[in-house]
Image (cartoon, rainbow, N blue to C red):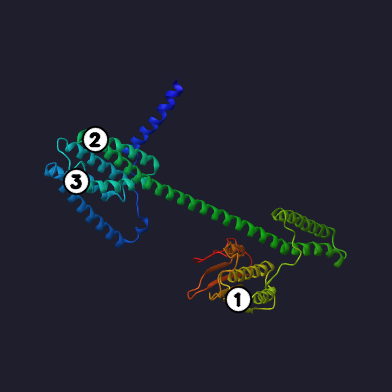
């Protein structure tokens, strides 16, 4: 018996809670129904003036209709309660609905003993204002408040008119259905907006996750490339330490022990480095056997791009000596990624590649004119190539800028120092670019 009573009372208690929320408990939050107009003062002022004029006309019309049934001063007060809350609809729709509902209910009680013409106790202007407030409230507050508003409208606004001013039951039923439909429409728009906001938030989280993953993958790739560079030097240290006693016979025992310790430390470091790099390598990724490419391989890359149909102009300037290996590899990878982006996003455009080595830095500049001869290449939906380029520049304490050009096209400019990585990572700056 208690279980049956509980099943019967639970929905009633829930509906009572919804009515309580709509009537007074739900907080009246400040909202902006048209946030896109927040920064357009002229449009806002024009809309405010239009709304003010419309509200004034509706108030005067409501007062004219009410004057036939109630005294003039009371007619003005009731008309104001019904229509003037429209001025609050854009910022506080729930408060505006509450005031308008009170105005409609008081109108019903004020007309007791007076026959409405023909059977409707409320002025048309008041009904229009109330309908708009119903829609705004449901759109902003959602389902729970909309259900409470629907029940309160039926019980506190429409139902009293049946016994007090002889509102026909059929009219009551039609009005209740119309109110419900308006609230359903507003709540549907609210639900759609909420779903869109959740999708936007989920998409932002997905993009942030992909960006973090791209950074980690690029850092892993850089670490593997650095392994090749550092491993070479560590191997040379071990070889030199082992060969030193043979080059200089008769070295003191302490010196021989020092060379032996150097060789042991070098080989241990190589072993540990290979172990760490093995952890960074994907399960299905084979170790790279070919030497890491450098600046001297850029002409070969450009020839391959020309054979693929790209128009590429190459300028290499600088001394004959190669830069440090890590800088050499990074310059090649930056040019490679920039050329790939140009071919993907602006196929057929003319691309200028310039690599200039000075005494202190290597300057890299890749720019296209944006004059594509066709649409984006298949698969050119964007990735995280610029993230990798920035990681490489930051690793070396350099800078990288990637942004659209003033007269069309896109450019990437990087400066990589030759004197080692500073204690703090160099800054990067970029414009509003599309990652490639």
SS assignment at label 2: helix
Q: Residue at x 87, y 64 (%)?
A: 250
Q: Is residue 42 above or below residue 189?
A: below
Q: Are marks 1 and 3 in contact (CB under 8 Å)?
A: no
Q: Which residue is tagged 1?
A: 353
Measured as percent of width and height from the top left, residue 104 is found at: 23, 41
Q: Which residue is tagged 3?
A: 79
Q: Quadrant of residue 276?
A: bottom right
User: From mark 2 to mark 1, how far is it between C-alphas?
Assistant: 83 Å
Q: Nearer the viewer, residue 281 or 264?
A: 281
How many other residues sit within 10 Å of disc 2, few (<14), some (14-19) or many (≥20)? some
Q: Which residue is tagged 2?
A: 162
How many other residues sit within 10 Å of disc 3, few (<14), some (14-19) or many (≥20)? many
Q: Nearer the viewer, residue 114 or 284?
A: 114
Tell me the quarter of the image containing the N terminus.
Answer: top left
Q: Residue at x 75, y 56 (%)?
A: 274
Q: Nearer the viewer, residue 359 or 158?
A: 158
Measured as percent of width and height from the top left, residue 209 is found at: 57, 53
């Amino acid at each position: 018996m208690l279980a049956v009573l509980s099943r019967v009372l639970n929905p009633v208690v829930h509906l009572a809670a919804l009515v309580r929320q709509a009537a007074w408990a739900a907080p009246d939050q400040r909202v902006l129904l048209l946030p896109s107009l927040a920064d357009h003062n002229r449009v806002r002022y024009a809309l405010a003036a239009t709304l003010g004029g419309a509200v004034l006309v509706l108030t005067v019309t409501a007062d004219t209709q009410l004057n036939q049934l109630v005294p003039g001063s009371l007619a003005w007060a009731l008309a104001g309660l019904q229509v003037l809350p429209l001025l609050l609809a854009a910022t506080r729709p729930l408060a505006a609905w509450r005031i308008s509902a009170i105005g409609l209910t008081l109108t019903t009680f004020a007309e007791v003993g007076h026959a409405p013409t023909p059977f409707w106790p409320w002025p048309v202007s008041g009904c229009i204002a109330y309908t708009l407030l119903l829609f705004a409230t449901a759109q902003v507050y959602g389902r729970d408040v909309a259900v409470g508003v629907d029940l309160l409208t039926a019980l506190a606004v429409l139902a009293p008119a049946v016994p007090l001013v002889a509102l026909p039951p059929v009219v009551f039923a039609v009005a209740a259905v119309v109110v419900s439909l308006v609230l359903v429409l507003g709540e549907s728009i609210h639900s759609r907006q909420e779903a869109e906001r959740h999708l936007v938030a989920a998409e932002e989280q997905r993009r942030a996750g992909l960006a973090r993953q791209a950074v980690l993958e690029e850092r892993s790739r850089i670490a593997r490339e650095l392994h090749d560079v550092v491993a070479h030097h560590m191997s040379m240290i071990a070889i030199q330490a082992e060969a030193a006693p043979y080059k200089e016979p008769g070295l003191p025992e302490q010196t021989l022990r020092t060379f032996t310790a150097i060789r042991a430390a070098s080989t241990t470091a190589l072993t540990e480095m290979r172990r760490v790099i093995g952890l960074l390598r994907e399960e299905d990724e084979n170790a790279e056997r070919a030497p890491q490419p450098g600046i001297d391989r850029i002409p070969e890359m450009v020839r391959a791009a020309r054979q693929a149909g790209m128009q590429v102009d190459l300028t290499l300037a600088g001394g004959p000596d190669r830069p440090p290996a890590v800088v050499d590899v990074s310059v090649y990878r930056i040019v490679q990624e920039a050329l790939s982006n140009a071919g993907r996003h602006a196929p057929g455009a003319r691309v200028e590649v310039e690599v200039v080595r000075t005494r202190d830095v290597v300057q890299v500049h890749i720019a296209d004119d944006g004059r594509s001869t066709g649409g984006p290449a298949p698969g050119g939906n964007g990735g995280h190539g610029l993230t990798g380029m920035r990681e490489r520049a930051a690793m070396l304490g350099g800078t990288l800028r990637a942004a659209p050009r003033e007269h069309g096209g896109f450019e990437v400019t990087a400066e990589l120092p030759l004197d080692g990585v500073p204690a703090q990572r160099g800054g990067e700056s970029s414009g509003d670019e599309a990652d490639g």
